[in-house]
Amino acid sequence: MSDEARAAGVHVRAEGAKPYGLESGPEGAAPFQHGGLAPCERRPVLSVEEALERILATVCVLEAERVPLLEATDRVLAEEVTADRDIPPLTNAAMDGYAVRGTDVAKSPVRLRVVGGVAAGHVSRVRVEPGQAVRIMTGAPLPAGADTVVRFEDTRQDGDWIEVLKAYTSGKNVRQAGEDVRAGQVVLQPGKILRPQEIGMLAAVGHLEVAVVRRPRVAILATGDEVVPPDRTPGPGQIRDANSYTVAAQVQWYGGVPLLLGVARDREDLVRRGVREALARRADLIITSGGVSVGDFDLVKQVLAAEGEMHFWSLNMKPGRPLAFGVIDGVPLLGLPGNPVAAMVSTELFARPALLKMQGFTDWSRPTVHARLSRPIQRKDGRRHYLRVRLRETDEGYEATLTGDQGSGILNSLVQADGLAVIPEEAEHLPAGAEVEVMLLNLPPRRCPRRRGPHR
Ligand code: AMP
Ligand code: MG
C-alpha cells in the first residue's frame, strides 16, 4: 500500500485476510473492456487501498491562481512570500510606562524627570537624556536615547517627576525592530496551508492577493430513468435525486466547486451528452452516480469505456461494491454506485483524497476515534464494512451503536450517524464491547491526524 493510501485514513487490510469468495481475480487483472456485458464476477476485486492508490496515481495537483487574501483561507500557497520590511518596523514599547535609559534604572529607587509623552502611532521628537523619562504607551516607538521601558506599576508619580521603585535591566519591556520578521526574510514557503495565522502574516507583509492552488471544478451527473430532480414531484416508480446534492456538499466540504449537471436518463446518448458537457465546462473531475452495476440499464460503464480509458472494479467493501474509474480526455472520472449511502461513502473514501491532492494537500489522513460496540456484529462475507454508527461518550470512552437498517439505500441511517465504524475484512464476529475504529462524519475531516490510543 502506498503512503498516499495509508495517509487517506483507509485501513490496512490485515495480513492473510481472505479474498472475497469466488470473485477474487488475479491481482492487476485486465480491466473489463466494453464489448458486451461482463458479469460482475469477472471484474477485478480490489481493496479500498488498491482502488485509492490507482485513483491517486492519475490525479495531479492543479495550477495556481491569484485570489484576494480572504479567499485563500484553508488553501495551499503556491508562491514564496518574503517580507518587504521589518516587523515590527521600529523598536517600540511592549508595556505602558516610561521610556528611560537602562543605565539610569540599574539601581532603585531613582528619580527621573518626565520630559514628554508618546502614544502608539506617533513618533516622539524628544530625546531621552540621562536622568530623563518619556511617558510611553504600548506599541509607540521608543524615543531616541531610551532603551528600556519601566512599567507604570513600578513607578510613583510626583508632578513632572517619577520615582522608579524597582531596578531594571537594560532593554526590558522593549520590542526590537525586526525581532518578529526581518526585511527580505522568507515568511511562507510554497505548499504551506493557509490557516488564519498565515493569513495574518500575509496581511502583515502587505500581500492582499496571493497565489494558491486553484479549487477543482467537479461535474456531478446523476443517472437513472427513475431519478428526477428534487424540485419535481416523483411520479410512480420515480425517486428524487439525492446523490447529486450529497456529493456536491461533500465536494464543497473538501474545497471543490460543484457543477451540477442534473440527471441523465438511462440512454447511452444522454449519459454520453452529460459527460461531454462536463468536459465542455472544464471539469477537473467528473463524478457520476448510478449505472455502474450489472443491471440492464447500467450504461455509464459502456459510455465511459467507449469514450475513454475506463476501469470497472468490484471493491471488497460494503456499501459501495461497484466503482468505475478512468480518464476521459485527460479528466478523471469516478462512477459511483447509485445507492445513496454507497455513493456518499465512496465519495468520502475516493473523491475526498483526490480532491485534496488536486488542491496541493499532501496529507489527507482523517480523524478517527476508537469506540466499543454496544451490540455484537456478525458477518461472513469477508468484505470491509463501513457501518453507520451513533457515538455516545461514556466514562470508558466512546460507545458505537448502529443507526438502524444498514441497507445501502437508507439515507436516514447516515443522517442519524456520527461516523462510520470500520469493520475489517477478516472480522466475522465482533462481540459487544469489541473495539472498532470510527471515521467521523461530523466535521469536514480533512487532515487531522488519526487519533491513536485506547480510547477517544
Ligand atoms: P443503480 O446504481 O443505478 O443501479 O442505482 C441503485 C439504486 O440507487 C436504485 O434503487 C436507484 O433508484 C437509486 N439511485 C440511483 N441514483 C440515485 C440518486 N441520484 N438519488 C437517489 N437514489 C438514487
Ligand atoms: Mg440506475
Image (cartoon, rainbow, N blue to C red):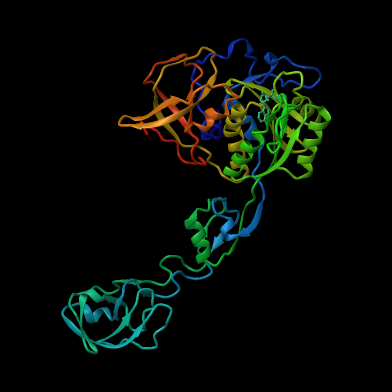
Total residue callouts: 0
Q: Above or below — where is 434 with respect to 280?
A: above
Q: Quadrant of the C terminus?
A: top left
Q: Residue at x 39, y 31 (%)?
A: 392
Ligand 1 - quadrant of the structure image: top right
Q: Residue at x 34, y 71 (%)?
A: 94
Q: Above or below — where is 97 with respect to 75?
A: below
Residue 100 placement (x, y as % from top left):
28, 81
- Left or right: 33, with 180 as reference point: right
Residue 219 placement (x, y as % from top left):
71, 40
Q: Nearer the viewer, residue 153 or 239?
A: 239
The quarter of the displayed image where residue 262 is located: top right
Q: Nearer the viewer, residue 224 or 440?
A: 224
Residue 428 placement (x, y as % from top left):
47, 13
User: Could you tell me if residue 291 is visible in this image?
Assistant: no
Q: Residue furthest top?
A: 22
The quarter of the displayed image where residue 60 is located: top right
Q: Nearer the viewer, residue 211 or 366?
A: 366
Q: Quadrant of the N terminus?
A: top right
Q: Residue at x 55, y 29 (%)?
A: 412
User: Could you tell me if residue 50 is visible in this image?
Assistant: yes
Residue 416 placement (x, y as % from top left):
49, 31
Q: Nearer the viewer, residue 89 or 368?
A: 368
Q: Above or below — where is 361 with respect to 419?
A: below
- Left or right: 275, with 199 as reference point: right
- Left or right: 320, with 127 as reference point: right
